[in-house]
Every structure is written in C-alpha cells, then in structure tokens.
Amino acid sequence: MNSGGDHPVDQSRQSIHVVVVELHHHSDLIRNVISVLELERFTMSLITVPGVYEKVGVAWEEKADWLSVSCKPPEESMAGFIERMRPVFESADILYFNTVRHYWAELCQIPFSSPSIIRVHNAHADLAPASHFYRPFIKFPAILSHLIRKVWIAGEWRQREQLFSHIDYFMFPNQTITDYVSERRWLSPQKILPPILPFGFLGEPTVSDTNIDAKIVTIAITGKVTNAKKDYRLVYLALKQCIDQLRFPLRLVLLGKAANKQAKQIVADFKTLESERFSLDYSDDYVSPDEFENKVASVDFLLAPIKIQTHFRKYGEVYGKSKMSGIENDILMHRKPSLVTAQYRIKGDIDKAVEYFEPTPESLAASMTAWVNQKKYDDLGSHFDEMSRYCPETVAKDFYRLCEKLVRGLPVEREH
C-alpha cells in the first residue's frame, strides 16, 4: 500500500515534507489534512493503519506525485512497523501527529530529528488526567482498575510524558481550547501553536437536488442518535411547546444512525409530534457520506443541543473548553447556520453564523420560533462569505507559512 512521487512545486518556494502519523481512527481528519496540504508546496507521507487507510476515501494513485502512504500490515507489530518507518521519519521536515491515544512507548522510538507537532483532541485526558477523572465517586471502582492496569502496570502516564518531552509544539482544534490550556499553564507558552490547521474548513456553497417544498423549514441534528452527547429530550420538549406557534411546517432530520434502544425511544418521542406541522426524517442504518451530503444540502439550519459535560475513557471533558464538538466542522463545511447550547461558545468568525440558547425547553422553543417564523437563518447564512480565513486555500497558505517558520527556527506569532 505504498505510492509516492514528486509534487510539482514553485521553484521560488521550498517544498515542505510533512510526515503525518494517524494510528487510530480519525480518517475524516486525515482526509481534510490531505485536502488542505495539496493546495500548497507540500509533500506528505502518511503513516497509518488499515482502518484509517480504507476510510480516508481519496484516490491515492491520483495524488502519487506528492502523497505517499505506508500502512501497517495486520500481522506486523506496531514496534516493528515504527522501526521499519525510520527512514520516512528521518526524511521529514515536519512530524505531525494527528491522534495519539496509545502506542506511547512505540512512538517514543521515532527519531525526532525535525520539528514535531501533536494535535490534542482531549485536553484533560492528555494534559491533566490526575485532576479530571469522570465522576470519581460514582466511577471509583472503574477508575481504580484503570489506574492499576493502565497507569501503574502499563505505565501510560509515564510513557505519555516521555513522548510529550520529545514534542516541540502542541496544536488544539480551535482558539477556545487553545486559550483554555494556555490560561491553565499546562504547557509552556512557547510550545502552544495557534490553531492554524482546523479540523474542518469552509465548504463550497451547495444547492439541494431534492425537491422539497420551500414553505417547509428543515432543520437537522448531526451525529449518532444518543443522549450521551446531545439532549434530544430537550429538543422534544421544546418542539412540543412551539410547533403550534410556527408559521411554516417544520421537518427535523436526524443525521446519524438511530438504531439502538435509546435511539428508538428518542425517535418514538418525536413521532408523537408528527402532524401537518411537523415531520421526522431518520435512518436505522449507517448514514453514508453521500446520503449525508444529499440530506444536509436541503437543511435550512442546524441544531446542536450539546451536553457540555462529557468524558473520554475515564477522564471528564468539557465541550467548549477541553474538547471540541463536531458542530463547528458541520457549520463550516456545509455552510449551515446553527442554534447552539449557550454554554458552548465559539470564538472567531464562525460565531457570526451561530445563535445561542439556554438549555431549557422555553429558551430553545423561543429560539426555534424566531428562526422559523422570521427565517433568521437566512441573515446568518450570509456571513459565510466573510469567513475567508477558513477557506482551504487560506488555511493551506497559513499552515505553509507556519511550517516554514518552524523549519527555519523562526519565532511564531502566538495569536492568529
């Protein structure tokens, strides 16, 4: 599973070789990285595993002039794979770790001979685990087991600290998390990069090819249908209050798999509201990328009833502080305004396409009524043309300038 070659470069600017490591599951983020890097003077080597390689969904052979990929065979140990990739690591201008959840000890064996960047998805789990256990009193037996097996015996915290000691720079998904970590001084300020390479970028304007009555307002909630991360009960209660006040019929699309017992109850609740004023669209099966794109194109605005308190493994995380919600990517990539839980504040230009509601049925009902009756989403949607800094071309240029400075050992501006 190897492809490679020379990427055509402007002779006036140096081509920067970025070695990207993704040994876990973020194939969508790798796809976004590829989409950005191919717009600038980069060559890229991806070090990955079959589960990621198969889901990235790019035509590798069409990008062989600048992109190469090395995929670990199932029968090979991770330590052996990392050692075999040594020449690739040594050829890097920039080492870029997209996700690191384990393999700490194996990754420590990489030759760190060039500037390295690591993306942190869960700030509490990675940077302050000892003070952020999730529900420590209720979950005490599970936490104790984790501490014994993973921390004491397997040495996870020690190995992670050892890997982080090799890392030159840390980058976070957005400015909010960057500021949160900076304010707590979990890292040296010199090691924190501005979030120049976001998880998502501004998509192209799209027009739905689905024939939907223009008098119907369509809203969507993205992600797997579960109460773990989003408050569907809140949405149900808010709809129950406001449906009769809406000037237009409302269509709710659940853009995620709704198959388990919890999802079936969520669907059943919404179905009790179905009438000439309200309809529901959902899927029992996995929503393919093509189906997702087709459905989201017909949506007028998104709804994000985010549950702020969440967890990663045994560690508590807070959406909007230590962890980013995918709603930011959905807003950008699909150019859809959104109603978002008030406790999840977004910094930067994306905020122009967002309005916030308090997590009460009354507040959400009032917001939905105003958005549907006054079509406020049309006004907010006009702001996407002002978000040029999130265009792939702009992101690519900014990331190239950043890498150029890192390679040359020049100082980096801390605010972007």
Image (cartoon, grey):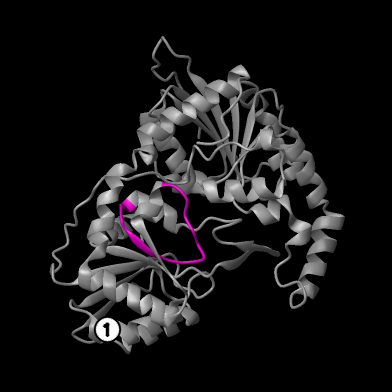
| 394 falls in the magenta region | no
Give the vertical position of 379 relative to 357 (above or below): above
Q: What element carries label 1?
A: helix
Towards the viewer: 358 or 269: 358
Q: In which quarter of the image is residue 252?
A: bottom left
Give the residues drawn in magenta, as a range. Answer: 334-348
Which residue sits furthest top?
11
Between residue 54 and residue 356, name the one nearer to us. Answer: 356
Residue 116 sits in quarter: top right
**Residue at left offset 27%, top offset 44%:** 385
Front one among 357 and 202: 357
Query: Image height check: is 402 above or below 212?
Result: above
Residue 71 visible (yes or no): no
Which secondary structure is most common in the magenta stretch? loop
Q: Is residue 391 left or right of residue 208?
A: right
* Image quadrant assignment for residue 92: top right
Residue lying at 36% horizontally and 50% vertically, measured from the top left: 332
Image coords of residue 312 (percent x, y): 64, 61
Mark 1 is on which residue type? Ile
Q: How many marks?
A: 1
* Picture layout, residue 285 above or below residue 206: below
**Residue 344 in sight:** yes
User: Label 1 belongs to which residue?
Assistant: 243
- Classify mark 1: residues with Cα within 10 Å, few (<14), some (14-19) or many (20+): many
How far across and down, in percent of the image, does residue 95 sit?
A: 61, 30
**Position of residue 43 in the picture relative to residue 131 (left or right):** left
Residue 313 at x, y percent in the picture: 67, 63
